[in-house]
């Protein structure tokens, strides 16, 4: 007999759609991280070559990558189809 407080293993597993969203988020974060490392290498190379006019656009590009990363981590979450009008997720009964 199943009580209302117990959850089965099937209930705890993420749905296929949720797993796809998490994988997409991870792939996007990795791609942005690689781009940011590339920008860092270009910044160091420009600084060592004393091309200071290039540094400001590279720093701005790195900041944009950082803001995109924050937005992906903070706001891009899979949504539930069981939301109420107030935004709370309705539990199965």
Image (tube, helix red, strand yellow):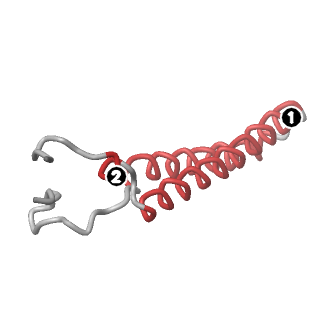
Gap between marks 2 and 1 measured at Cα: 59 Å
Helix, strand or loop at label 2? It is: helix
Helix, strand or loop at label 1? It is: loop
Depth check: 28 or 83 in front?
83
* Image quarter of residue 63: top right
Left or right of 62? Residue 5 is left
Q: Of marks 2 and 1, which one's residue comes earlier in the chain?
A: 2
Q: Give x and y (percent) for residue 11.
A: 30, 52
Estimate how packed mark 1 is, as few (under 14), some (14 to 19) or many (20 or more) residues with alpha carbons within 10 Å: few
Up/down of 82 relative to 60, above or below: below
What residue lies at 74% left-to-right and 38% top-to-bottom? 40
Q: Could you say which disc has been placed on residue 87 in the image? A: none
Depth check: 66 or 7 in front?
7
* Image quarter of residue 84: bottom left
Up/down of 25 relative to 42, above or below: below
Estimate how packed mark 2 is, as few (under 14), some (14 to 19) or many (20 or more) residues with alpha carbons within 10 Å: few
Depth check: 60 or 21 in front?
21
Q: Give x and y (percent) for residue 74.
A: 38, 47
Left or right of 93? Residue 28 is right
What residue lies at 58% left-to-right and 49% top-to-bottom? 29
Name the mark nearer the viewer: 2 or 1. Answer: 2
Please name the residue that numbered disc 2 is placed on: 10
Query: In the image as oriented, which residue stretches furthest toward the top?
Result: 48
Depth check: 15 or 56 in front?
15
CB under 8 Å between callouts 2 and 1? no
Q: Quadrant of the C terminus?
A: bottom left
Left or right of 64? Residue 55 is right
Please name the residue that numbered disc 1 is placed on: 50
What residue lies at 18% left-to-right and 41% top-to-bottom? 6
């Amino acid at each position: 007999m199943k009580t209302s407080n117990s959850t089965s293993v099937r209930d705890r597993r993420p749905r296929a759609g949720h797993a796809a969203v998490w994988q997409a988020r991870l792939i996007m974060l990795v791609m942005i991280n690689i781009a940011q490392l590339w920008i860092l290498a270009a910044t160091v190379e420009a600084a060592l070559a004393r091309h200071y006019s290039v540094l400001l656009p590279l720093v701005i590009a790195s900041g944009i990558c950082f803001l995109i990363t924050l937005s992906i981590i903070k706001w891009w979450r899979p949504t539930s189809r069981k939301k109420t009008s107030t935004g709370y997720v309705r539990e199965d009964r």
